[in-house]
């Protein structure tokens, strides 16, 4: 029996039992057999969820890029590592082999060094989905620099906040980016952001769109001429198992975005192992994850997990609707994609289009379909299963988080029978628990509660950059000796899990995590606004959309409300990005508050969701009269 590659259900149960009975032994075997170490560990695991402190493979020495690139050179030098499909379907795809990737990463790493970047330095990467993005991550990892990728749809303010939070010395960006028929001035956004980032010493600029941009003397340099001069050979920096690999920001329900810090060895082992099993990757397969590398899905399942397995991973620059809604299927046919991993919001958007977009393409290469990022509703699940998978490709509904680094609850295709809307069973080594609000574990089946994890797994984030206390408060304080996910879940009669959604003030819009507090803070910057509260309401494509309740400093009819709505969304776009725009904005004379002054979001949520039959007790409110007003004017 191979612990590394699970092929049927019995094997899953056997390996699962082994992995929880003796996690140290289990992960040690996986690590030993399938990776390249410069030195083996002294200790597999030490952990304390109270502190909290988690260490995997302590004492081991390695470089993750040797595992993702160098070790494949003997057997896979000419195999495509990255298959780049550009935004414009008429621009040729690029097949970057492992050998070429090795050279490109070596050159890029030498350029970073020549600009004074070394081990432990933070490098912010703000790039579109072009090969340089993947190469930049790997180049940082090659020399032990810590990458912090910021999704290139975030605004200048959001970018500068993230740059300053981790004190990045360098930014890597491009002149512009293509998205469908749009060309975006990426460098202009960076220039704006850097007005408030004194710590940034240099900016490397990739030429993607040939647009005219400003280059600041002494700070900004074009990347290509430096690459042309650079040596292809760059010896890997030998890292400790627990050295930081990257920081990736995710929204919290309050305050600043949280810079989740992932370390090296455990992250590598877990993303590689999950990739192999969750997608049943075989040597000749062409795997495509449609996420952006700006999110954790792209880090773990476009770059590190696939490359650690010597896979061919597709990188797509464009959008599903350009040049038409058949683009995904055209790309699947063109490259004979075998595994396809996307988000429910994309599936719902495509399901709304005519079947002709899908019918004209040959999708017979597909073997496994995946979804991630938010709960998938039954209708979307069936549409995906019937029309894309033709009922023969299992759907893996993978539940996980930026914080978990890798997939946590998922079917294993061809082993676990799937069930629509269910993420099904915990992955190998994962020990979930459902908790009640009093902090007791709810045992047995046909129950629901708050989803926690009882035992560490190798790729759990180790801290929030610069704020360990917040890491403790957010994830380890709600339930004793447990990692709290922030999600609710139910367990059915056979032990399958279904994720029911966030139980905190994070709203998932089109698969993007959005904290309500930062959006409210942005709105409150508008001079006419006194207070605001954001809640989510169901939306047929986005899953959830945002509903804002806004009170104005001056009431009265003098302000044009439609104009104000536009201005408010403009402020949000500037502070966060267009992904956080509100679908509905209701102006109200007040917000329902408890006597201690806390906004009662529960009530606002119910009104936005049109569930006003049972609002619960409102008599204890400070201002119960406002509830009726809000209900009367609900949008
Ligand atoms: O609420 C869960 C939801 O997305 C959250 C994590 O978001 P993020 O850190 O951005 O990572 C997304 C990609 C891994 C979770 O707390 N979520 C993610 N996957 C699923 C999901 N909800 C239901 N089903 C899923 N498969």
Image (spheres, rainbow, N blue to C red):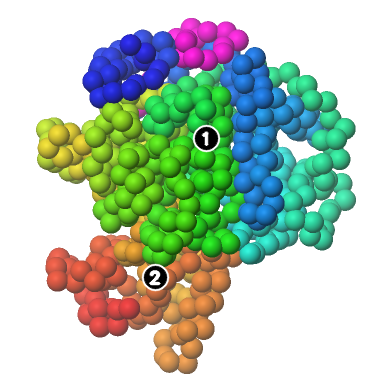
Q: Which residue is mark 2?
A: 548
Q: Residues within 10 Å of mark 1 (few under 14, many from 20)?
A: many
Lateral position of residue 451 relative to residue 183, left or right:
left
Give me the residue at 37% from left, 77% from top.
586
Q: Which residue is mark 1?
A: 286
Indicate yes or no: mark 2 CB to ligand 1 under 8 Å.
no
Q: Let me know if residue 39 is in the magenta part.
A: yes
Above or below: residue 222 compared with residue 154: above
Residue 60 position, x and y percent, is: 54, 12
Q: 127 or 55: which is nearer to us?
A: 127
Residue 514 position, x and y percent, is: 44, 55
Q: Secondary structure at mark 1?
A: strand
Give me the residue at 25% from left, 17% from top.
14
Q: Which residues are magenta?
A: 31-49
Q: Nearer the viewer, mark 1 or mark 2?
A: 1
Lateral position of residue 7 relative to residue 140, left or right:
left
Q: Let me know if residue 286 is in the magenta part.
A: no
């Amino acid at each position: 029996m191979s612990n590394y590659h699970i092929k049927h259900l019995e094997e899953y149960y056997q390996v699962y039992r082994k992995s929880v009975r003796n996690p140290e032994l289990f992960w040690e075997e996986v690590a030993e057999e399938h990776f390249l170490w410069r030195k083996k560990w002294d200790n597999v695991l030490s952990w304390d969820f109270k502190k909290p402190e988690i260490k995997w493979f302590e004492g081991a020495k390695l470089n993750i890029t040797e595992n993702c690139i160098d070790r494949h050179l003997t057997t896979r030098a000419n195999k495509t590592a990255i298959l780049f499909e550009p935004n414009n379907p008429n621009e040729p795809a690029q097949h970057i082999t492992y050998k070429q990737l090795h050279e490109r990463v070596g050159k890029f790493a030498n350029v970073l060094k020549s600009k004074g970047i070394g081990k432990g330095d933070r490098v912010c990467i703000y790039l579109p989905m072009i090969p340089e993005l993947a190469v930049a991550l790997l180049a940082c990892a090659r020399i032990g620099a810590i990458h912090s990728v910021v999704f290139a749809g975030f605004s200048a303010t959001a970018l500068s906040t993230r740059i300053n939070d981790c004190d990045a010395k360098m930014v890597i960006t491009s002149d512009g980016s293509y998205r469908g028929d749009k060309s975006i001035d990426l460098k202009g956004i960076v220039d704006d952001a850097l007005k408030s980032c004194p710590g940034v010493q240099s900016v490397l600029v990739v030429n993607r769109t040939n647009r005219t941009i400003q280059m600041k003397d002494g700070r900004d340099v074009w990347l290509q001429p430096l690459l042309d001069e650079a040596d292809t050979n760059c010896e890997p920096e030998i890292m400790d198992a627990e050295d930081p690999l990257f920081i990736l920001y995710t929204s919290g329900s309050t305050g600043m975005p949280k810079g989740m810090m992932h370390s090296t060895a455990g992250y590598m082992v877990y993303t590689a192992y999950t990739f192999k099993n969750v997608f049943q990757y075989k040597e000749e397969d062409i795997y495509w994850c449609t996420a952006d590398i700006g999110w954790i899905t792209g880090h773990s399942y476009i770059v590190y997990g696939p490359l650690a397995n010597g896979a061919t991973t597709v990188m797509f620059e464009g959008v599903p609707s350009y040049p038409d809604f058949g683009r995904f299927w055209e790309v699947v046919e063109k490259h004979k994609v075998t595994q396809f991993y996307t988000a429910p919001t994309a599936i719902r958007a495509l399901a709304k289009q005519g079947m002709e977009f899908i019918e004209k393409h040959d999708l017979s290469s597909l073997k496994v379909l995946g979804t991630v990022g938010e709960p998938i509703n039954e209708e979307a699940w069936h549409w995906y299963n019937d029309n894309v998978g033709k009922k023969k490709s299992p759907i893996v509904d993978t539940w996980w988080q930026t914080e978990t680094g890798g997939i946590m609850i998922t079917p294993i295709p061809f082993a676990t029978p799937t069930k629509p809307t269910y993420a099904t069973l915990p992955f190998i080594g994962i020990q979930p628990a459902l908790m009640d609000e009093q902090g007791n574990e709810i045992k047995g089946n046909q129950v629901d509660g708050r989803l926690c994890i009882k035992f560490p797994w190798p790729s759990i984030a180790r801290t929030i950059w610069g704020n360990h206390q917040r890491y403790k408060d957010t994830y380890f304080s709600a339930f004793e000796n447990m990692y709290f996910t922030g999600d609710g879940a139910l367990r059915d009669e056979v032990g399958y899990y279904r994720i029911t959604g966030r139980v905190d003030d994070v709203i998932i819009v089109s698969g993007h995590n959005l904290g309500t507090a930062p959006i409210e803070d942005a709105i409150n910057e508008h001079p006419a606004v006194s207070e605001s509260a954001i809640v989510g309401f169901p939306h047929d494509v986005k899953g959830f959309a945002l509903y804002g309740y806004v009170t104005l400093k001056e009431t009265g009819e003098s302000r044009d409300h439609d104009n104000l709505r536009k201005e408010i969304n403009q402020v949000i776009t500037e502070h966060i990005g267009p992904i956080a725009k509100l679908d509905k904005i209701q102006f109200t004379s007040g917000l329902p508050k408890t006597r201690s002054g806390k906004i009662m979001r529960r009530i606002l949520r119910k009104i936005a969701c049109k569930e006003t039959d049972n609002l619960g007790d409102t008599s204890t409110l400070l201002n119960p009269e406002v509830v009726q007003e809000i209900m009367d004017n609900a949008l």
